[in-house]
Image (tube, rainbow, N blue to C red):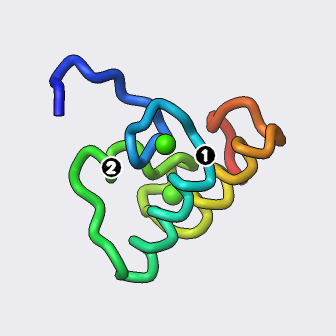
Amino acid sequence: MEDEQKVMLGDVNYDGEITYEDSVLILQSDSKIITLNEYQKSVSDVNYDGTINYNDAVQILRYDAGLIKDFNWYN
Ligand SMILES: [Ca+2]
Ligand SMILES: [Ca+2]
């Protein structure tokens, strides 16, 4: 991973886009199916509540659906 890589909140699989695929990774982590690496953890808490769980995945889905423009608000 490049140090210069831009950190994009919600882009868990760092492909440059925030999509349902990112929410899937969060859900898999929440279900203990996968473990997120440190970078992924740093961009996964999109509702800033200190934990990474399905609520963050829901926010990413809302973003992907165009319902919200950014993550700077709570639920
Ligand atoms: Ca992504
Ligand atoms: Ca969270």
When asked about the image quadrant of residue 34, the answer is bottom left
In the shown orientation, is residue 26 left or right of residue 54? left
Residue 59 placement (x, y as % from top left): 66, 52
Please, what secondary structure does the residue beneath circle 1 have?
A: loop
In the rendered image, the residue lying farthest to the top is 4
The kind of residue tagged 1 is Thr
Q: Is residue 51 above or below residue 30?
A: above
Q: Which residue is mark 2?
A: 40
In the shown orientation, is residue 21 left or right of residue 3? right
Identified at 34% across, 22% down, the residue is: 6
Q: Which residue is mark 1?
A: 19
Choose mark 1 or mark 2, whichever is in front: 1
Sequence order check: which comes first, mark 1 or mark 2? 1
Identified at 36% across, 28% down, the residue is: 7
Cβ of mark 1 under 8 A from ligand 1: yes
The kind of residue tagged 2 is Gln
Q: Is residue 51 above or below residue 43?
A: below
Q: Residues within 10 Å of mark 2 (few under 14, many from 20)?
A: many
In the rendered image, the residue lying farthest to the right is 67
